[in-house]
Amino acid sequence: MVTKRRAGRPAEAYLPLPPATFHILVALADGERHGYAIMKSVGLGLGPGTLYGSLKRLLEAGLVEEGGERADPERGDERRRYYRLTPLGLSVVRAEARRLDAMVRAARRKKLIGERPA
Amino acid sequence: MSAEGLYRLLLRAYPPEFRAEYGREMVLLFRDQCTESDVRTVGFWARVLWDVARSAPVLRIEAWCESTRTMEVVMKLAAMLTLLVGVLGVLNAGVDAGAAYMGTIGGMHALSLVLSVFASILLLVAGYAILRPTEQGRQVARLALFASLALIVTARLLHPWMSPFSQLVGIGFPVAFLIALYWPRRALSSGAA
């Protein structure tokens, strides 16, 4: 497993996050999940290559960590690898959510959303 | 061939290290997708191919960039060899210059020797600069290598006699290093994912 953490880097240094990355981090905010559960949670038609490519980078950046391997009780099949947010990952996804929220509020102030444009 | 078998073939587009780490998980995920979708439709395979086409090349490039870290070590060893070659070049030119003072070589030969001495000194400078892992060091190394190459070519033109080994070292070293120094590298400040 690759664990090249970038210690001391503030959460804001990782922003802006690519959309797929943000969705994966949001999916993991509830707790640890395996790849299929992340994909279902994201709901954007994320394929296995894009999902595991993003997870690999997130593991390398220290935003996500592996939570062990076990079978999903709901699916009851082969053992699956679970992933969870690290404290840094949680800080980064919060910072990105705040950034996006500020952008949405700015768009609302300019009446780009929230009411029918003129 | 089954859909999973076909997907296993597509997985070959990914770097071997990535396949070894995530291949099994990807096949499991694909199996899940198969249970939810009709694998006989064009749309399903179009999505699968699009996913492979957009993720595999990026991961290949990343894997290649990772391997260039090994290149950094090779560069350091080569830089030390350059320092050694530079010292030997200066000594060799010194011996020949001694012969020139004895009157056994002509003026052009003597001039080419002086140029060879400067070229060797520049190789020394380049070797030292490459050992410094800064962008300024790389700039100095590039300049020194270009200048060394120009001097050695001028020396070769002024005095046609030059041993094949000297030509190989004098021209081959700077050219090889310039290629290595101008080779594109991954930006250090790349994002999280």
Image: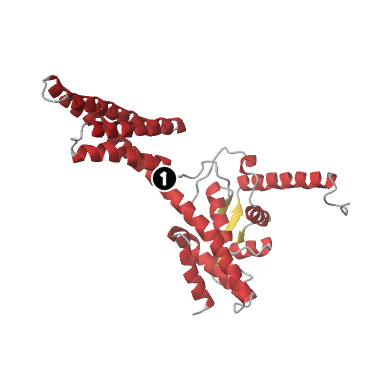
Residue B115, by quadrant, is top left
* Residue under label 1: B69
Q: Is residue B32 above or below residue A99?
A: below
Looking at the rendered structure, the number of numbered marks drawn on it comes to 1
Residue at image coords 15%, 25%: B106
In the image shown, does A85 or A117 lie closer to the viewer? A117
Is B188 placed left or right of B91 in the picture? right
Q: Mark 1 Cα within 10 Å, few/some/many (few <14, many 20+)? A: few
Q: In this view, does B27 lie above or below B181?
A: below
Q: Position of residue B7 (x, y in %)?
A: 51, 71
Label 1 chain ID: B
Mark 1, secondary structure of its residue: helix
Is B129 placed left or right of A5 in the picture? left
Could you tell me if residue B14 is visible in this image?
yes
Q: In this view, does B73 lie above or below A85?
A: above
In this figure, which colouring scheme has been used for the structure? secondary structure
In the image shown, does B88 or A24 lie closer to the viewer? B88
Residue at image coords 14%, 25%: B105
Residue at image coords 25%, 38%: B169
Which three-letter amino acid code belongs to the residue tagged 1? Arg
Residue at image coords 85%, 48%: A111
Q: Where is residue A47 in the image (x, y as percent from the top left)?
A: 60, 64
Could you tell me if residue B29 is visible in this image?
no
In the image shown, does B178 or B193 lie closer to the viewer? B178
Q: Position of residue B128 (x, y in %)?
A: 34, 30
Q: In this view, does B90 lie above or below B67?
A: above
